[in-house]
Amino acid sequence: MSGLVVAAAQAESRAGDLASNVATAARLVRQAGARVVVLPEAFLTGYDASAFAGALPTVDDLAGVVLDPLREAAVAAGATVVASAALARPHGRTLSSVVVGPDGTTTAPYDKQHLDGDEPDWFVAGESGASIVVDGHVLALSICRDGSVPAHAAEAAAAGAAAYLCSAAYFPGGARRMDVTYAARALDHRFPVVVAGLTGRCGAHTFIGGSAVYGPDAEPLARLGDGEGVARAELALG
């Protein structure tokens, strides 16, 4: 067994202000003191129609200087950062996981498969699951409503995931559903779940935070309310 220190980080994101959000993400990574840091859904671009309707970054854009502050923070911390952004892909717009490695490499390996609310007005759904490997551990990626679809985590577990990482954005009134959802995924598959929730105001919306790390028994190892912060825990993974 080995210990993997993980963190779910939350803060307010500014709609359409990529540079500001990257700076905030870098600050959270420096604060986290973790090997893996998960950030909320669409944190880099902001979760709001004004951002979704505007010019979105491409994967090539994220390989450029705009993401340098986050890359520098990841390298300095020796951390793998699972961020999230609305992206312009060749086949359409997506809500995606953006992963920055401890060597500064940047990839966008996962697109949200289960769109929610008015998201289908803006985005196309991803077609397959994805995972990353950190210190030999397979960590599955998910974005918000993916976690509410039991088959999504079941497929990740069947593919050998040792933990389930989720970038999320929940509106007021969703706190109980958020807690039950991710605790259930942990209990279903006896693996830890790390969920980072957007908080504060972003464009026309308000979000509730609620970031947490759940152990395989569904008990919260760390949890936040609606303020900026980091939920940090050490996971014993086989």
Image (cartoon, helix red, strand yellow):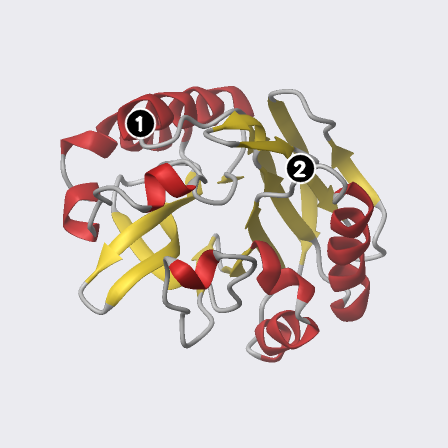
Q: Position of residue 170 (x, y in %)?
A: 64, 43
Name above or below for residue 200 compared with residue 55.
above
Secondary structure of the residue carrying numbered label 2 = loop
Label 1, on which residue? 17
* Res 77 seen here: yes
Q: Amino acid at mark 1?
A: Asp
Question: In front: 180, or 99?
Answer: 180
User: Of the residues under marks 1 and 2, which one precedes in the sequence?
Assistant: 1
Mark 1 is surrounded, within 10 Å at the Cα level, by few (under 14), some (14 to 19) or many (20 or more) other residues, namely some
Residues 177 and 185: in front is: 177
With 186 as the anchor, is 142 left or right in this view?
A: left
Q: Nearer the viewer, residue 44 or 36?
A: 44
Residue 146 on image: x %, y % = 58, 64
**Residue 211 shows which numbered tag?**
2
Where's the N terminus, which quadrant? bottom right
Q: Secondary structure at mark 1?
A: loop
Residue at 40%, 70% (x, y): give it: 126
Disc assigned to residue 124: none
What is the crowding at mark 2: few (fewer than 14 residues within 10 Å), some, or many (at least 20)? many
Q: Position of residue 112 (x, y in %)?
A: 46, 62
Instruction: Residue 54: give x, y in percent of width and height.
Output: 25, 42
Q: Amino acid at mark 2?
A: Ser
